[in-house]
Amino acid sequence: LDYLKEIKETTLGAFEHQNYPFEELVDKVNVARDLCRNPLFDTMFALQNTENVEIQLPGLHLSTYASEEI
């Protein structure tokens, strides 16, 4: 449960800053550039617009999160 809370907070924080220019972010964190891979991350979270479908899994409650679009 703690892990899911951490993922939720990280994801919501990312949505709040999603319009930050990527190249500026790469410059500010000052990571070594390697053309073989992305400079900041190895995985990516992608939210796609889907219908609000109720998903039921044993022992897990899932609900939608209302957000404002920019």
Image (tube, helix red, strand yellow):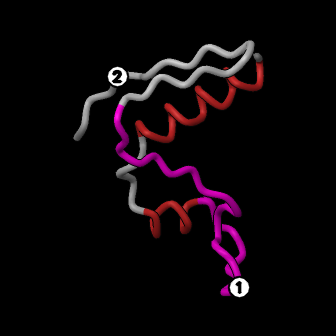
**Image x and y of residue 40, in percent:** 64, 63
Q: What amino acid type is highlighted by mark number 2?
A: Ala
Q: Which residue is mark 2?
A: 66
As drawn, the label of residue 36 is: 1
Residue 4 occupies which quadrant of the picture?
top right
**Label 1 vs 2, first from the N-terminus:** 1
Instruction: Answer whether residue 55 is magenta in the image.
Output: no
Mark 2 surroundings: few (<14), some (14-19) or many (≥20) residues within 10 A: few
Q: What amino acid type is highlighted by mark number 1?
A: Cys
Total numbered labels: 2
**Image x and y of residue 69, in percent:** 25, 37
**Image x and y of residue 8, in percent:** 59, 27
The residue drawn where x is 56% and y is 19% is: 62
In the displayed structure, 69 sits above or below 57; it is below
The residue drawn where x is 43% and y is 22% is: 64
Q: Nearer the viewer, residue 60 or 29?
A: 60
Q: Nearer the viewer, residue 55 or 32?
A: 55
The residue drawn where x is 50% and y is 31% is: 12
| 41 with respect to 49 (left or right) | right
Mark 1 surroundings: few (<14), some (14-19) or many (≥20) residues within 10 A: few
> Which label lies toward us, 1 or 2?
2
Q: Quadrant of the N terminus?
A: top right
In the displayed structure, 43 sits above or below 64; it is below
| 21 with respect to 40 (left or right) | left
| 55 with respect to 65 (left or right) | right
In the displayed structure, 51 sits above or below 49; it is above
In the displayed structure, 36 sits above or below 17; it is below
As drawn, the label of residue 46 is: none
The residue drawn where x is 57% and y is 50% is: 45
**Image x and y of residue 49, in percent:** 35, 44
| 18 with respect to 33 (left or right) | left
Residue range of the region highlighted in magenta in the rendering:
29-51
